[in-house]
């Protein structure tokens, strides 16, 4: 199957975390064309972070989209010119105070290719140790906790973890960590 | 941890698939408040659809966000007042021509609670049978194919399936279908 031809984008509105564009795309045979919503975001990272005792490091934070507190893996957005691994190390340290000397990049996926242009880079951090206090942005309000991997399954089943990007990160980490494979 | 107080939203821009609002939210103790981007979408469905021979029904379609053809499970957005199961049946029939008499709702998750208000409803459809030709919207260009469940693992490893919502749907289906558990 051939891809369509996206021939121009126009800025509709500049948001805080994205820029909203209208894009025109045309079928390969030229028979049909239409206008589509496109959101440009910075790339994101998500970190499946395990301690030496095989507990997973999770965060609770208020999210305005669902207007509730969610349980997530640590993560965040690239700063200008930042490398994915540096972003992951920075976000984990800022949000949780944990560091690791054992990082592995698992994959980069599309959060939602229907209308979003960015990628989510998923990392596994093993043997994490608490080295610092949190260092949060003014509008971040994050509670850190660890829990045994064996409790993840129940948290997902009970809709306590219900963020698609967190579930996707756990999925890829389960390819690498047997203890996760058994319980996600 | 307490949730913040979201006290008002203002419409910034009306898109084709969302409405973009600016929301004001305040920390529970009133110490900090800020403005956040919020996108209102209709709820979505995603269907893990298996044939009687345990092949999975997948679609290829051009996506303007990543400007490429993606491989996905069938799915789509609620129409006004539509029930999740009716949406799932309609989208599967329109996009693929397949029907099932064996539907199960697996869960509803947050596609991205950081800024999106909607839910993704995930369904499992077993014993699917091809009953009709596709019935696509003018701007839909979708190719249907089936593949053995045993090939899913390689498709994910090779980044051929890299849409977070598709991976999330497969993850939940794997709780129910042993053949999926082995290969996702």
Image: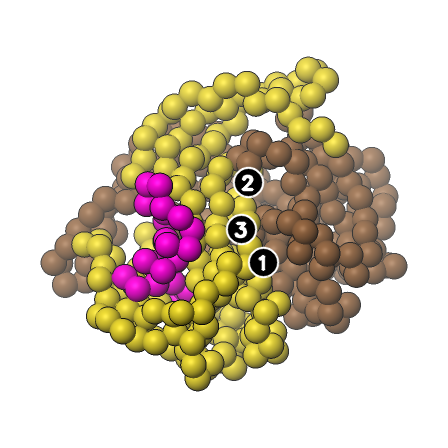
Chain colours: A yellow, B brown
Above or below — where is A4 with respect to B52? above
Give the answer, above or below, for where A44 lies relative to A168. Answer: above
B110 displayed left or right of A13: right
Q: Nearer the viewer, residue A105 or B76?
A: A105
Please tell me whether mark 2 sits on a helix, a strand or a loop.
loop
Question: Please, which residue is most extreme toward the front here?
Answer: A101
Residue assigned mark 2: A113
Which picture quadrant has residue A40?
Answer: top left
Residue ID for mark 1? B168
Q: Give the range drawn in magenta.
A: A71-94
SS label for mark 3: strand
Q: How far apart are marks 2 and 3 (CA)?
A: 13 Å
Nearer the N terminus, badge 2 or badge 3? Answer: 3
Report how far apart the C-alphas of labels 3 and 1 lie in the structure: 15 Å
Badge 3: chain ID:
A
Specify whether B148 is left or right of A73: right
Q: In which quarter of the image is the N terminus of chain A?
A: top right
Q: Mark 3 points at which residue?
A: A108
């Amino acid at each position: 199957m051939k891809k369509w031809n996206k021939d121009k984008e126009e800025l509709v509105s500049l948001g805080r975390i994205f820029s909203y564009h209208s894009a025109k795309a045309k079928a390969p045979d030229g028979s049909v064309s239409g206008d589509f919503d496109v959101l440009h975001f910075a790339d994101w990272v998500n970190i499946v972070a395990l301690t030496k005792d095989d507990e997973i490091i999770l965060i609770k934070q208020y999210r305005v989209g669902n207007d509730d507190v969610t349980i997530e893996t640590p993560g965040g957005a690239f700063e200008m010119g930042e490398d994915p691994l540096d972003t992951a190390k920075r976000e984990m340290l800022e949000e949780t105070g944990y560091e690791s000397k054992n990082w592995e990049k698992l994959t980069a996926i599309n959060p939602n290719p229907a209308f979003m242009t960015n990628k989510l880079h998923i990392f596994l951090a093993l043997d994490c140790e608490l080295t610092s206090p949190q260092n949060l942005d003014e509008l971040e309000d994050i509670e850190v906790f660890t829990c045994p991997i064996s409790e993840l399954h129940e948290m997902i089943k009970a809709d306590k973890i219900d963020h698609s990007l967190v579930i996707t990160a756990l999925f890829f980490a389960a390819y690498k960590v047997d203890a996760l494979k058994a319980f996600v």
